[in-house]
Amino acid sequence: MQSGTTTRVSVATCLWFDDQAEQAAEFYTSLIPGSRIHSRMRDAIDAPPLLVEFTLGGSPYQALNGGPHFVHSEAASISVLTDSQEETDRLWAALTADGGCESQCGWLKDRFGVSWQIVPRRFIELQGSDDKAAVQHARQAMFSMRKLDLAALEAAFYGAAPADGENA
């Protein structure tokens, strides 16, 4: 790039679907606050969209109807930080319904085969603590869970807190 030249770059995650891009985008935007569909690009007025552009919680995404050439993998997931156990429970129930499936450590696959991580924000904060023993106890508790249980994670963390009462 030449000195003084400015270019504008936009980045979005593109999710490949056989033929369910619009349904997936509508479902996802109905679940996550601060989400909406921006556009549907069609080859013809009455055709299903080839590409749906949307945001989830303010992050840009695209959903592409590309046919049966690729499948989703756990190697890429949508990670959602929640502010409460109720929000974790709500998203978990919605995303695992109608053919979705639970995995370990807060991971799941939705009915479209897309992998998600539903993680209480507080767990991430606990993992940043200088108390390595407490961090390890909380992490070990997480390894035994499917849907993350914030109260159990905090109990594991604080059960390992130093004797002087210092916590994260």
Image (cartoon, helix red, strand yellow):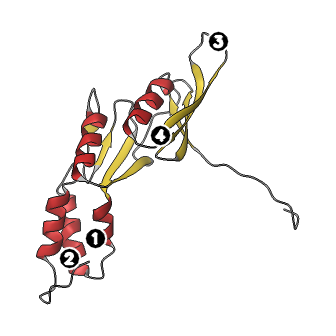
Give coordinates of residue 23: x percent, y percent: 44, 24
Q: Amino acid at mark 1?
A: Leu
Query: Label 3 is placed on what type of residue?
Result: Ile
Q: Position of residue 166 (x, y in %)?
A: 20, 85
Residue that carries the numbered disc 1 in the rendered image: 126
Label 4 to label 1: alpha-carbon separation? 28 Å
Above or below 115: residue 100: above
Return the residue found at the far bottom: 164
Earlier along the polypeptide chain: callout 3 or callout 1? 3
In three-dimensional space, the C-alpha distance between marks 3 and 1, rounded to whole angstroms, equals 51 Å
Residue sitting at 44 percent across and 35 percent down? Answer: 29
Is residue 73 rendered to the left or right of residue 39? Answer: left
Q: Which mark is residue 45?
A: 3
Residue depicted at x 18% and y 55%: 149
Which is more N-terminal, label 4 or label 3? Answer: 4
Asked whether 29 or 116 is in front, the reply is: 29
| Mark 1: secondary structure | helix
Looking at the rendered structure, the secondary structure element under dot 4 is loop
**Vertical side of 140 occupied by 31: above or below:** above
Q: Which residue is mark 4?
A: 35
Provide the residue designation for mark 2. 134
Residues 104 and 155: in front is 155
The residue lying at 34 percent from left, 74 percent from top is 128
